[in-house]
Amino acid sequence: MHQSAVEFLATATRDLNASLDLPEVLRTVAERACEFVPCDLLCVMLYDEESRLLHHSYSLKLGEHVEQTGSFPIGYGISGTAAQLKQPIRVADVRQDARYVRFRHADVEIRSELAIPLLIRDRVIGVLDLESLEPDGYSLDHEQMLTTLASHLAMALENARLYQRVSAQEQRMEREIATARKIQKGLMPRNVPLMDGFEVGKAFRPARELAGDFYDFLLYADGRLALTVADVAGKATPAALYGSLAVGLMRGHVVQQQGNPSQMLQHLNDQLVALTVEGRFLAMVYALVDPRERTLTLASAGFPFPRLVRKGEVTVLDSFGDIPLGLFAKRHYEDFTLVLQPGDLVVFVSDGLEDGLDPKGNPSMGERLNTWLARLSPYSAQEVVDELMQASTPALTGRSESQDDRTAVAIRVK
């Protein structure tokens, strides 16, 4: 092979590897081929294995890019035959070859043609087709050089095509995740409920696009307010779907039967167990505020212990169950009733927020949370959860990003 041909192959190969953009690679393939081999018409055709058709993908006519669409089966025309035989075809005079098919170029009279199949491990990727206005326009050297380059052309095209598919799939997934996140956000209450003598605060920060944490407020017909905070095992889409399902089941049951927290947890547990979703379970606390009796009745299923802040003193409310929902059938949960006093603050936080306050894993679990709550005891319910969320922000705790969703709900007795 001549030195100029070797240099051309090296330069062409380098340029082909410089991009994964399919239109750019197609253009580079066409332009590089025409730089070294004379061609009046050139077409790069890509093969679709599903439709078993060759598609016109990029064309040059007298050195200028032209739009050429259409497709044809393998075996049709000189290009289709080259793809079928998986070997080059060089025709000195197309007028003497019955396989020649003239495509939409009435202003040029093609006389000779060279079709090079683009193969990867004997698999057809496409065809590089060159046509000349001169008879016998292509030599054996041209055929050999383009055949040598063909494997690089095929690999560059295949990589670009795969990248295009992956990119399109990622964009589709991003749109789907954005839609799912919007739906999930819509499932959570936008506003905190209003009750005489009480104030409620909420804060929520997902670690990823979709969250496994959720909270909800449910108003009973007799004026009582139920609030829940929950954390699904796992992260991202599966956890979000499981959590959304739990919200739907819980709201549906409240419409039919407004039971005590323990009854609600037992019903939800039975529903989730019956679904038999492997590897998924739900830690939840269900609290019921009675504004007339000024009581708070709680039941928990493996959720971090709530905190009561009374006169600046922090008490961990640890009389709760430790078995999350969705693991075992026929579980029974216990109610715990707290008589509230003016100024009391009850705070529920997910483990993501609690861990965020103490990323080094203090052996005295919850010590930093208790310290923060004692400091925040004069604040309003919303100010408390906002401050906790800010304090657990990764930038303030030495982490690059949140490892888990962070959720906090607080109730203040006026």
Image (cartoon, rainbow, N blue to C red):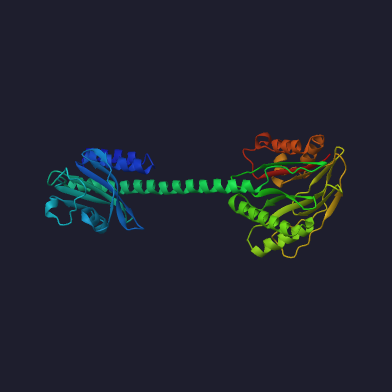
Residue 102 in picture, x, y percent from top left: 19, 50
Q: Is residue 54 left or right of residue 249?
A: left
Q: Is residue 347 left or right of residue 62?
A: right
Residue 220 in picture, x, y percent from top left: 77, 52
Foreground pick, 14 / 312: 312
Foreground pick, 151 / 279: 279
Q: Residue at x 70, y 38 (%)?
A: 389
Q: How many marks?
A: 0
Res. 349 in view: yes
Q: Quadrant of residue 51?
A: bottom left
What is the residue that sits farthest to the front in this orientation?
221
Res. 359 in view: no
Q: Quadrant of residue 406?
A: top right
Residue 162 in picture, x, y percent from top left: 40, 49
Q: Is residue 271 left or right of residue 51?
A: right
Q: Quadrant of the C terminus?
A: top right
Residue 368 in picture, x, y percent from top left: 77, 39
Foreground pick, 146 / 273: 273
Q: Quadrant of residue 258?
A: bottom right
Q: Quadrant of the N terminus?
A: top left
